[in-house]
Image (cartoon, helix red, strand yellow):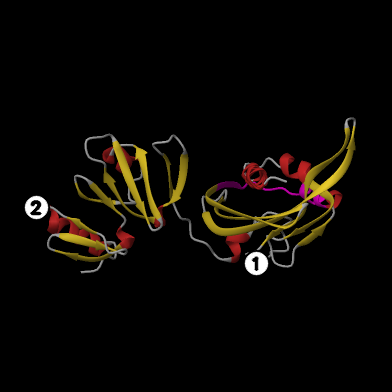
Amino acid sequence: MDTDDMIRRSIFIITEYYKNNLEPFFESISDDVLWIGPAQRQQIQGRKTLIQTFAKEEHALTFTMGNIMALCVSPHTHVKEVLLHYDVYTHYPSGNTLLHDQRLHYTWREKRVKTASGWEYRPEIVMLQINNLFKYDNRDTIYPVHYESLYDAEPERSVTVKASDLSVHRILAGRILYIETVKRSAKLRIHMEDGALTINETLTDFEKKYPGLFLRIHASYLINPAHVREIRRFFVTLSDGTQLPIPEKKYTHIKGLLLQKGGED
């Protein structure tokens, strides 16, 4: 088994899974597959049982994935262990979006099968384990349909943007520190707690699209008030230490708005 190929297969299966397309997963599992998680104490043994369990599943959830990292090790010639680490956003019909930092462990083995041209090896999944489990609700089958009620989750808004490479990203508003105009272009740079993303948008259009989420403090900057740690003449300091300017004529007005939203003096 080629390492890169097994990583590609593993990523493809889970990305299709979160598009609610289960066929690539079902086609890849062994007859004696073991499924562990994602809920606590959840174990399902056997391909037939697993498919039957999924057939009983009814939900109206949608999902968005991001920040996929992969690692593969080979404990045996015919075995590959693939570990995926990624963010998964679960979007509920209520409008809630919950973020889960998920680690997924595949065990692949090569099965010797007879074909018209002779014997060959084909990879199959013998174990799939979700390592960071969440609380189980007895009303659920596979998907965390009632997960939000267990935690009394408050709705958290998100923004959906198209990056410069044309990829589409859905970002929880709470992760965003500030948005700035990229000079001499119709682009913005979104600064988050874990990195930055350049998108095709103007600051004015972005502000109109997501009213109430961010505060315009400058012709070139929108900030997330939740990340303001200090406001002084004539700048704000954000939670990561970034300092952004406030025009002198707008300072008193901006300070008042931030204090209303819980900003610090």
Q: Quadrant of the C terminus?
A: bottom left
Q: Is residue 17 left or right of residue 151?
A: right
Residue 166 x %, y %: 44, 34
Give the amino acid type for the residue marked by disc 2 in the picture: Lys
Residue under the point 39% across and 36% down: 164
Residue 239 x %, y %: 31, 64
Numbered disc total: 2
Give the amino acid type for the residue marked by disc 1 in the picture: Lys
* In the foreground, 89 or 115: 115
Residue 216 x %, y %: 24, 49
- Residue 188 in which image quadrant: top left
In the orientation shown, which residue stands out farthest toward the top?
116
User: Dot 1: what SS?
Assistant: loop
In the displayed structure, 48 sits above or below 117; it is below
In the displayed structure, 233 sits above or below 201; it is below
Residue under the point 65% across and 67% down: 135
Earlier residue among tags 2 and 1: 1
In the displayed structure, 222 sits above or below 151; it is above
In the orientation shown, which residue stands out farthest toward the bottom?
265
What span is in magenta?
50-64
Q: Which mark is residue 135?
A: 1
Residue under the point 86% across and 45% down: 112
Q: Which mark is residue 3?
A: none
Residue 128 x %, y %: 73, 56
Q: Is residue 217 on the magenta stretch?
A: no
Using a 10 Å C-alpha cutoff, classify the residue at mark 1 as few (fewer than 14 neighbours), some (14 to 19) or many (20 or more).
some
Residue marked by disc 2: 249
User: Dot 2: what SS?
Assistant: helix
Q: CA distance from mark 2 to mark 1?
A: 51 Å
Q: Is residue 58 on the magenta stretch?
A: yes
